[in-house]
Image (cartoon, rainbow, N blue to C red):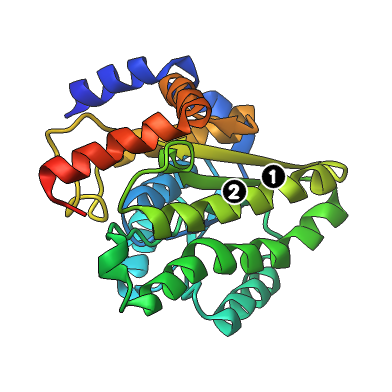
Amino acid sequence: MNVTNDIYRLLLGPSWSRVASARLEAAVGDRVVLVTGASSGIGARTAELLAGAGANVLLAARRVDELTVVADRIMAAGGRASAYRVDLAEPAEVDRLVEEVLADHGRVDVVVNNAGKSIRRSLADTADRFHDVTRTNAVNYLGPVRLVSGLLPQMRARGGGHVVNVSSLTVDLPSAHWAVYTASKAAFEAWLRCVAPEIRVDGVATTSIHFPLVHTAMSAPTYSTRLPGLTVDGAAEVIGRALVYRPRVLIPWWVRLAGLVADVAQGPYEAGQARVLRITGRT
């Protein structure tokens, strides 16, 4: 899988390559970094990578037992880590998280908005499950907005900070059966684009990473591991690079081209998907 991952990253372009350890240490050393969705997958590996580079990592997720395991692993390796339980779908819990981390650490320099809820379901199958629509938007959009909004004032007051958003290429290439997930991801992306100029005035940077397939436990039920994609290690290294170079947005070059075609030829793009659905009978 390592060879496959390295080849795949070459196809994504140089902006997706791993960064030198010294550069990462210079970027995050002694910084307080909050990583959501840190109990497993991309979040856990990102937390470990950044802690290894000298960051004081704050781990946030719902599963406190798994969070503790990750935190213990980081500290056993000589890093700094603290675990915080939070359900981003619960406003009161988000507010409590903001209060606790600021009380415990005085500041948050970086937020890695990684937590997310994935849902692949047709419109017909969603009709009687609107609670899934509500929760997906709460986790992927409303919760992150509340969290980042709560942490931005202290960043702006100090004149610096960085918000990194783990997004998806589905924002650029909308696909059938991904309406709820894509809409929630696109909503937070739109919010971040709107506030970016306001907070940039005060020295706060924003980065959105539109990831292609990353092989995680969340993606496993939908995508075969035989499909080309990033490993969680590879995804974490991309986030590390983003913290060093602070690009506004990171999108695979071929997604940019395909997204342009999909926008210009929206009718044919949708007709092509409809044809596939008719052939497969998956409507």
Mark 2 secondary-structure assignment = helix
Q: Quadrant of residue 1?
A: top left
Q: Is residue 200 above or below residue 230?
A: below
What residue is disc 2 on? 189
- Give the quadrant of the C terminus: bottom left
Residue at image x 80%, y 61%? 153
Corner quadrant of residue 52: top left
Front residue of this view, candidates 172 and 140: 172
The residue to which callout 1 is attached is 193
Viewer can see residue 20: no
Say if mark 2 contacts mark 1, CB within 8 Å.
yes
Residue at position x 43%, y 34% from top? Answer: 267
Image location of residue 157, percent across then percent down: 87, 56
Query: Which kind of residue does numbered mark 1 sit on?
Result: Arg
Q: Is residue 54 left or right of residue 148?
A: left
Q: Position of residue 239 (x, y in %)?
A: 49, 37
